[in-house]
C-alpha cells in the first residue's frame, strides 16, 4: 500500500508539473522558430544595407565627377586650354583603378606658363591600402609625361570622424597629395 501511495504522489507531482513542462517546451520551440525567422530577416537586412551602401558610393562618385566637370568648364571659360588636365586626369584615374585606389577628389590649380614649359598642379585626395597607394604613387611618378608628386600627407582612414575605409582589410589610408605635370613647349 505504501508503494501505491508513493506511485500516486509521484503521479500527482507529475500532473502538477505537466503544465510547466508543456509551457517550457513551448517557450523553447518558439525561441528556436524566432531565431530561424530573425536570422533570415538579418540576412535580408545585410543584403539591402550592402545595396544601399553601393548606391551611396555611386552617388558620391557621380557628385565628384560633376564637380570636376564643372571646374573644367569654368577653366575653359577663363581661356585655359584644359586638354592637358583632361589627359593627366584620365591617366591618373586609370592608374587608380588599376591599383585599387579610390580617388575622392581632384582639384586643378592654375597652370603656370614659363618660357620653356607649362606647369600644371592639382590636388588629389584618395583612399586605399598602403601597398596599393605606394604602387599608385610610383606609377604617377613614372608616367610618360613628366609628373611629380610634390607633396603628400597620409593618415589612417579611421582617424577622420564619420569616415569609413574603402575596404575592411589591410591598413587603409587617406592621402592628400599635390601632383605637378610639366609640358615642354
Image (cartoon, rainbow, N blue to C red):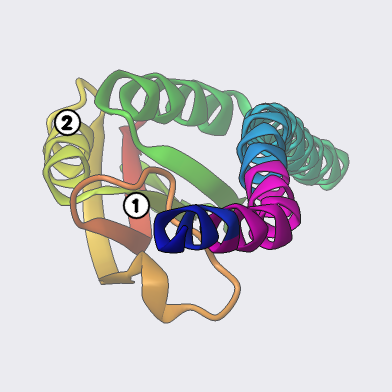
Q: Is residue 18 magenta?
A: yes
Mark 1 or mark 2: whose residue is earlier in sequence = 2
Residue at 18% x, 49% y is 170
Which secondary structure, mark 2? helix
Image quadrant for the C terminus? top left
Residue 35 in the image, given as x and y percentages of width and height: 63, 39
CA–CA distance in space, label 1 to label 2: 12 Å
**Residue 101 seen in render:** yes
For residue 156, above or below residue 39: below
Residue 38 in the image, given as x and y percentages of width and height: 70, 38
**Residue 81 seen in render:** no
**Which region of the structure is painted magenta?**
9-27
Residue at 30% x, 19% y is 98
For residue 86, above or below residue 26: above
Residue bearing the label numbered 1: 179
Residue at 44% x, 39% y is 102
Residue bearing the label numbered 2: 139
Asked whether 61 or 124 is in front, the reply is: 61
Which secondary structure, mark 1? strand
Mark 2 Cα-neighbour bin, 10 Å: few <14, some 14–19, many ≥20: some
Q: Nearer the viewer, mark 1 or mark 2?
A: 2
Amino acid at each position: 500500500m505504501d508503494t501505491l501511495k508513493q506511485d500516486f504522489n509521484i503521479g500527482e507531482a507529475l500532473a502538477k508539473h505537466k503544465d510547466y513542462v508543456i509551457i517550457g517546451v513551448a517557450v523553447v520551440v518558439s525561441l528556436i522558430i524566432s531565431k530561424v525567422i530573425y536570422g533570415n530577416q538579418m540576412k535580408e537586412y545585410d543584403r539591402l544595407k550592402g545595396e544601399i551602401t553601393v548606391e551611396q558610393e555611386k552617388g558620391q562618385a557621380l557628385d565628384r565627377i560633376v564637380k570636376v566637370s564643372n571646374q573644367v568648364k569654368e577653366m575653359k571659360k577663363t581661356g585655359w586650354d584644359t586638354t592637358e588636365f583632361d589627359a593627366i586626369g584620365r591617366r591618373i584615374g586609370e592608374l587608380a583603378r588599376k591599383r585599387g585606389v579610390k580617388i575622392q577628389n581632384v582639384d586643378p590649380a592654375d597652370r603656370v606658363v614659363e618660357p620653356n614649359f607649362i606647369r600644371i598642379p592639382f590636388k588629389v585626395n584618395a583612399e586605399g591600402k598602403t601597398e596599393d597607394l605606394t604602387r599608385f604613387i610610383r606609377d604617377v611618378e613614372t608616367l610618360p609625361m613628366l609628373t611629380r608628386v610634390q607633396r603628400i600627407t597620409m593618415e589612417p582612414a579611421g582617424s577622420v570622424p564619420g569616415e569609413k575605409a574603402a575596404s575592411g582589410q589591410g591598413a587603409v589610408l587617406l592621402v592628400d597629395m599635390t601632383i605637378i605635370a610639366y609640358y615642354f613647349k
